[in-house]
Amino acid sequence: RKEVEQDPGPFNVPEGATVAFNCTYSNSASQSFFWYRQDCRKEPKLLMSVYSSGNEDGRFTAQLNRASQYISLLIRDSKLSDSATYLCVVRETTDKLIFGTGTRLQVFP
Amino acid sequence: GAVVSQHPSWVICKSGTSVKIECRSLDFQATTMFWYRQFPKQSLMLMATSNEGSKATYEQGVEKDKFLINHASLTLSTLTVTSAHPEDSSFYICSARDQLAGTIYFGEGSWLTVV
């Protein structure tokens, strides 16, 4: 079983759509959780941290359910510029970041 | 904000030669840096954890004699791919942990092509 599993994707959605990504992790001792965005042939960039209380940053909402070991990301009112690969990332006790395989999003006009 | 610089961005080398990639934290000190590798359409896979002043910790399946890591200062870690082969062609990315703030920052990555 992979340590961090994500929706297989790709997701092809029209501009303005709402899209949700899911992620599960296997290590219950994991400490921190993040969503990163990676554009083609570039390094990953932090999109947002994920907290148990849920958090929102503009059109992006992230949720964490520690009991289910489940993380989600919701993108509202999708823009063309949102097209990228979204990586679910878990930080373990040793500071190691474990990356999911990523879900590709393509927003079309 | 904090920046992690990685050099070179692109490198092409011949089979059998060695290539060195540098990861530098520009405005913070990093006792710990991480090296990742990403093959096409795959996720980032942690190769090793680089610790300033001590030996690196390698992940299972990563050959320490092939991927030499040196973390001689609080701002610089280097990864040397020795006796490179075409299957080593990949995107190598480093990250550095700001030891004061705890935040982890990524370098821009290095594309290695072995011909």
Image (cartoon, coloured by chain):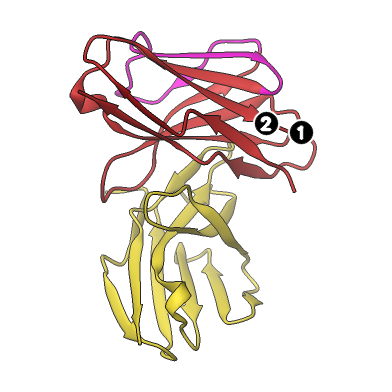
Chain colours: A yellow, B red
- To which chain does the residue with label 1 belong? B
> Which disc, if any, is residue B41?
none
- Snapshot quadrant of residue B71: top right
**Marks 1,2: beta carbons within 8 A:** yes
Secondary structure at badge 1 equals loop
Quadrant assignment, res A47:
bottom right
Residue A17: x and y in percent read 41, 90
The magenta region covers B53-75
Q: Nearest the camera: B100 or B17? A: B17
Quarter placement of the C terminus of chain A: bottom left
Q: Which residue position is annotated with label 1?
A: B28
Q: Which residue is mark 2?
A: B25
Residue A97 in the image, given as x and y percentages of width and height: 51, 43
Magenta stretch holds residue A42? no
For this view, does A81 lie left or right of residue B40? right
Q: Magenta part mainly helix, strand or loop?
A: loop
Q: Residues within 10 Å of mark 2 (few under 14, many from 20)?
A: many
